[in-house]
Image (spheres, helix red, strand yellow):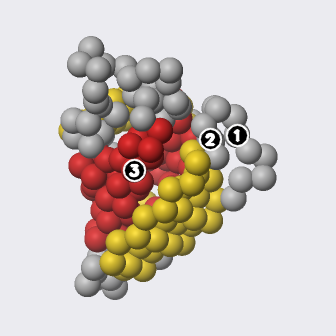
Amino acid sequence: MRRIEQARKTKETDISIAFEFPEDGSVAPDRVIEIQTGVPFFDHMLHAMVFHGGFAASIRARGDVAVDDHHTVEDVGIVLGRILGEYTGQVGAVRRFGHAVVPMDDALAEVTIDLGGRPFLVYLADYPQDRVGSFDASLAREFFQGLANAGLANVHCRVHYGLNTHHMIEALFKAFGRALAEATRPAASTLSTKGLL
């Protein structure tokens, strides 16, 4: 496992993340996943993403959740994006592309990733409920936007359908974890006709 640590402190949030990438594609049986952001549903989604991607992580965040969950969710995405950028810089050649389709009961979600250094997010989801408990469903997009921008990643997220917003967002985070695992595996050479990402 290759461990990358990043922190970010602003007037709105204080975030520290340690993220471990399995370099040979295997999943460590004793890996640890510890997540505390102060946003319970977001914790649940991050845990699903890390677990199904085969990663290990410690994610700690304190934010102005008394105002809104927005800053915490977005800033965790930014810090994870920076970790992703540092990881690809350290490893050099990675598989670059990742894709996963994940069902969860009534919902089906798909994520495709390109770690080619060109940040862009496509996010297609039409949620039938605006909230999951106290969590604003629109914030899921803010997480992926922050991650794509900071990680210089091209991320396409699509929830094909679903009846339950919880299931739809969870399928999306699981799909992202699996796609990210594929994209971050080391490769023998740089996968670009330019010779450089």
Image spot of residue 80 (x, y percent): 40, 55
Residues at marks 1 and 2 touching, judged by CB atoms closer than 8 Å: yes
Q: Amino acid at mark 1?
A: Val
Q: Residue at x 69, y 34 (%)?
A: 26
Residue at the outermost right position: 29
Image spot of residue 59 (x, y percent): 52, 66
Mark 2, secondary structure of its residue: loop
Q: Is residue 176 visible?
A: no
Asked where in the image residue 124 lies, by quadrant, the reply is top left
Which residue matches tag 1?
27
Asked where in the image residue 76 lies, by quadrant, the reply is bottom left
Q: Which mark is residue 22?
A: 2
Q: Is residue 116 above or below residue 189?
A: below
Which residue matches tag 3?
86
Disc 1 crowd rating (10 Å Cα; few below 14, some 14-19, many 20+) is some
Disc 2 crowd rating (10 Å Cα; few below 14, some 14-19, many 20+) is some
Residues at marks 3 and 2 touching, judged by CB atoms closer than 8 Å: no
